[in-house]
Image (cartoon, helix red, strand yellow):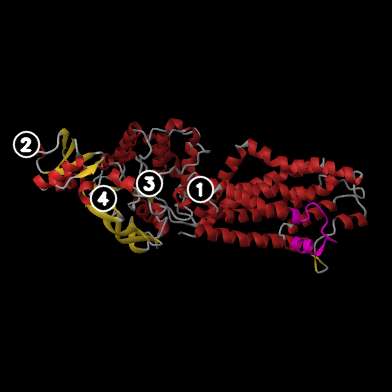
Amino acid sequence: MSAATVVQVRVPARSAASELRAIKILWQRDLIRYFSDKLRIFTSLIQPALLLFVLGTGLSQLTSNSIDGVNLRTYFYPGILAMAVMFTSVVSAASVVWDREFGFLREMLVAPVRRSSIVIGKCLGGATVAGTQGLIMLALAGPAGVPYAPTLILAVFGLQLLLTFTLSAFALIVAARVREMQTFMALTQTLLMPMFFLSGAMYPVTGLPTWLTVLNRVDPLTYAVDPMRRVVFNHLDISVETRHRLDPGVTWAGWHVPTLVEAALILAIGLVLLGGAVAEFSRSD
Amino acid sequence: MDGPAVSVSGLVRRYGEVEAVRGIDLSIDADETFGFLGPNGAGKSTTINILCTLIKPTAGSARVAGHDVVRERDEVRRNIGLVFQDTTLDAYLTAERNLRLHAELYGMPRNTIDSRLRHVLDMVGLWDRRSSKVSTFSGGMKRRLEIARGLMHSPRVLFLDEPTIGLDPQTRASIWSYIRELRAREHITIFMTTHYMDEAEYCDRIAIIDQGRIIALDTPQALKASIGKDRVQIHTEDDAVAIAALGALFGITAAMSEGVVMFAVEEGEQFVPKLFSDFPVAIRSVNVARPSLDDVFMSYTGTTIRDAETSQVDPVPAGSALFGREARR
């Protein structure tokens, strides 16, 4: 090839379209990496499946197999749906820590794109991967004693996406600050476990001692688990009393927080965290 | 290209109390290959990171491809290609995917991507391996792929930060043949850092940097000629006595370097017989050499580049908070 035939490229000025291309390619990169790692898909399903089938079935022994006719597996199911996306979103964001370790982060940071595009691309990538995980858990509705109703699947999936978006943004903030993988994992697990246990994913949230009630209401995860349980219980054939006992709903000073308010709350927290993540990545020095 | 490809004036970068770069001025012409030569910790990486918009200068200014590195960051980024010391490839993706990802990040016109991809992969001899995952590549192949990627978007200035560090001599030579070929084929300014003196010889001009300052800047030939002296190394029975004797008998300042007594003298071959006539210490061996860039470095800093490296500990991380491996430690 002679010098005359060399293709010279002019990189055009930055535009909304070029930012979208950057977001899209970073999103795709996360998907390619996730779907080429079968082991990762498998391992991230183990924990929720364990909780659902082992803990759910085991604990059923204590409650003569059901509480007011509701199997404990069924009761745990909404919490497990939330849990499945929780851990996956955080593991996805951990890729930023790896990217720094293996240098790829630099390639992204010196590209002529906004830092917000990088963060949004990463966040969408993590959310999509976690959403896929959520869909797989939704497929286990049958064994958990929950009907495969299209409205249920759509509503739960929507809530899962919302939750995973917010958690991805949160994990990205941590990833921007933390340099070591061990630290990242230790830190996120330390934060996620209490959030999960406080959220009411494993128990009804009324009639708790005051300290636990306060912690529960402060925990953002509560407002993702509660609507998921409401959606699932809407499709169960149970008495009003049982429903009231097992799915009391979250209250603020006696006021039942509606599903839409809860969803809006998760979205708002997610947007604030995303803004925080962009700010973290924009710090130049 | 109008004006210089890179122009720097009064550049300073401070990390707390430490001044990594202490006032650098330079101007690099379009299509020039410019070498930045100095020991680790001299300020090379800090300067290159400023020019690449990765860190901000504390004082002074720099323009790359006609754009200010602080105020017109995106303009600069579109016009530069980067090859860092540490790999920045995604090892889980194939070579081709890495380049396509780069093309998308840089917003390259879609109709140019395929031909450009073929061109840069051909140039570094990796077209046949385009579908292999980068994790299967050797160190030299990765470096070649990084060079190809840095060239994907036809940058006007290509920054090579220690392009051959950590590679075996054969691979180093092959990387250099690609760089020379690149200079012949594309109109491109190359700004490289190195601490291999022999590699600096390939540059049109070099700047020797030590402790954050440029201490010499010229063509390699002119720098060597400026010394006008040959380098003499002698191995003696008693080096301390030999150094004292050189001073007393000939007025020569000699120093220990890499285990031998070393000094510079005009017309070295004629000096050696004089040295043997009445020297108080037995001389085991003598080596006379024409000045090399090592000697240039020695004459400006009073130490060889290797000695400078072993005695100097990098005072500051080369990257900034987000930028990678150095910053982590």
Q: Which residue bears the numbered disc 1? A: A100
Q: Which residue bears the numbered disc 4? A: B208
> Of helix, strand and loop, which one carries label 1?
helix
Residue A166: quadrant of the picture: bottom right
Q: Which dot marks residue B277?
A: 2
Task: Please name which of the two marks, 4 or 2, marks the residue nearer to the observer.
Answer: 2
Marks 4 & 1, CB-CB < 8 Å contact: no
Q: Which dot marks residue B154?
A: 3
Tell me the amino acid under the disc marked 2. Ser
Q: Are marks 4 and 1 on the same chain?
A: no
Q: Give the chain letter at badge 1.
A: A
Range of the magenta residues?
A: A197-216
> Of helix, strand and loop, which one carries label 2?
helix
Tell me the amino acid under the disc marked 4. Ile
Q: Is A163 placed left or right of B109 in the picture?
A: right
User: Residue at 85% across / 44% down in the picture?
Assistant: A59
Say whether residue B199 is magenta. Answer: no
Q: Is residue B190 visible?
A: no
Q: Is A41 placed left or right of A236 in the picture?
A: left
Q: Residues within 10 Å of mark 3 (few under 14, many from 20)?
A: many
Q: Residues within 10 Å of mark 1 (few under 14, many from 20)?
A: many
> Of helix, strand and loop, which one carries label 4?
strand
Tell me the amino acid under the disc marked 1. Arg
Q: Give the chain letter at badge 4.
A: B
Near-viewer residue (B271 or A250) = B271
Label 4 – label 1 distance at C-alpha: 31 Å
User: Residue at 55% across / 53% down in the picture?
Assistant: A178
Q: Which dot marks residue B247?
A: none
Q: Is A219 placed left or right of B287 in the picture?
A: right
